Image: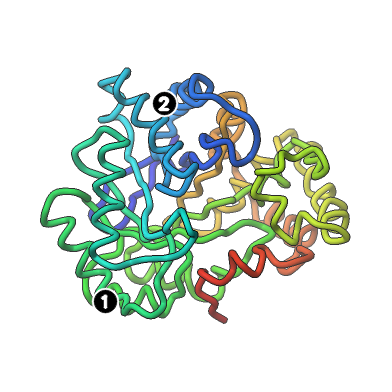
């Protein structure tokens, strides 16, 4: 797999990474052995950038990955590892104070069984705390050798510009896919200008652009997607009708829908490193193959006609989840 740079001066990683949220069972039943096989498959397919977070479980995903490193000593050096903190699990809230972030970082290091985190994100921004102050906390973590690079998730381009005046932000992680185009309103461009990698999460539109047909009624009660307006009727039926056209286009060209969706993301800029989530070795291989799909100008034009900007019905988050995400336009 070709590689891309994770921020100015940062490591080179496979251009498609692995989101490990589903290791915590948030998108269906799983177990540690299956997650470990998925990590084995990642190395076999050139996927060497893992993304996790304290809140996944909470603590489950980090623990699963940490156990993998404990039983596969050499694997740690083969992966670039990112995790996130700043969300309080219970009661759910956001805390970016130095005291709480120190607890987050130290806990992640312990669960992962490592000495230093390659990339550490603020998972959600605390709006009443200046982002400049948060950057100073993160820079102190770098001085202490706890983290190597700094990132933020779901912030605005304006906040990125403010943070970058204090220190280099290696990566920004926002939702981005054919059904979530908000980052085109400045984030992708700002990241490129500042030498910051843009890391799209949910690049497969939370599974709707894969070859799996999601039956919402059969999703587990704990499945995060049940809370999302785009998976609720009548929105879901409209969305499935539109994405079915994209899937048919992919199949007609001999591609897997997931691979085509990821190829489209990769074509939006050389600084984009999507992190599709999966708990399956088989699905990971399909995702990785997306890096081999070469799209022409006509392909890109066709895709834009099939799934135009703004096609998706319903908000991408519930009101409660949206409250901690920065809005920009």
CB atoms of marks 2 and 1 within 8 Å: no
Neighbor class of circle 2 (other Cα within 10 Å; few <14, some 14-19, many 20+) is some
Q: Give the mark nearer the N terminus: 2 vs 1.
A: 2
Asked which colour scheme the image uses, the reply is: rainbow
Mark number, residue 43 = 2
Residue 86 in the image: state x and y as whole percent: 37, 60
Q: Residue at x 53, y 22 (%)?
A: 34
Q: Residue at x 64, y 49 (%)?
A: 224
**Badge 2 element:** helix
Q: Is residue 99 left or right of residue 285?
A: left
User: Which residue occupies the foreground of this view, 19 or 3?
Assistant: 19
Q: Quadrant of the C terminus?
A: bottom right
Q: Quadrant of the N terminus?
A: top left
Quadrant position of residue 77: top left
Residue 125 in the image: state x and y as whole percent: 41, 69
**Badge 1 element:** helix
Q: Which residue is mark 1?
A: 132
Spatial CA distance of label 2 from label 1 is 37 Å
Neighbor class of circle 1 (other Cα within 10 Å; few <14, some 14-19, many 20+) is some
Relative to 58, say whether 194 is above or below: below
């Amino acid at each position: 797999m070709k590689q891309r740079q994770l921020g100015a001066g940062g490591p080179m990683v496979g251009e498609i990474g692995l989101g490990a949220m589903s290791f915590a069972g948030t998108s269906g039943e799983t177990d540690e052995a299956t997650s470990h096989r998925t990590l084995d498959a990642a190395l076999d397919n050139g996927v060497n950038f893992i993304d996790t977070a304290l809140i996944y479980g909470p603590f489950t995903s980090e623990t699963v990955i940490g156990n993998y490193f404990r039983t596969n000593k050499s694997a740690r050096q083969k992966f670039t590892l990112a995790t996130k903190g700043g969300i309080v699990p219970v009661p759910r809230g956001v805390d970016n104070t130095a005291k709480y972030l120190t607890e987050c970082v130290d806990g992640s290091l312990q669960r992962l069984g490592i000495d230093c985190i390659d990339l550490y994100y603020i998972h959600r921004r605390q709006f009443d705390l200046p982002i400049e102050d948060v950057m100073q906390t993160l820079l102190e973590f770098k001085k202490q050798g706890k983290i190597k690079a700094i990132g933020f998730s779901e912030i605005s381009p304006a906040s990125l510009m403010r943070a970058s005046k204090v220190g280099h932000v290696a990566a920004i992680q926002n939702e981005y896919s054919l059904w979530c185009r908000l980052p085109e309103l400045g984030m992708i461009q700002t990241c490129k200008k500042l030498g910051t990698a843009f890391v799209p999460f949910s690049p497969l539109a939370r599974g709707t652009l894969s070859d799996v047909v999601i039956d919402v009624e059969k999703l587990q009660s704990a499945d995060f997607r049940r809370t999302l307006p785009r998976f609720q009727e009548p929105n879901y039926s409209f969305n499935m009708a539109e994405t079915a056209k994209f899937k048919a286009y992919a199949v007609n060209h001999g591609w897997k829908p997931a691979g085509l969706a990821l190829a489209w993301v990769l074509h939006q800029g050389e600084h984009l490193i999507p992190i599709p989530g999966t708990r399956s070795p088989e699905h990971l291989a399909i995702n990785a193959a997306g890096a081999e799909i070469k799209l022409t100008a006509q392909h890109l034009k066709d895709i834009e006609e099939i799934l135009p900007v703004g096609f998706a019905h319903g908000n991408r988050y519930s009101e409660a989840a949206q409250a901690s995400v920065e809005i920009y336009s």
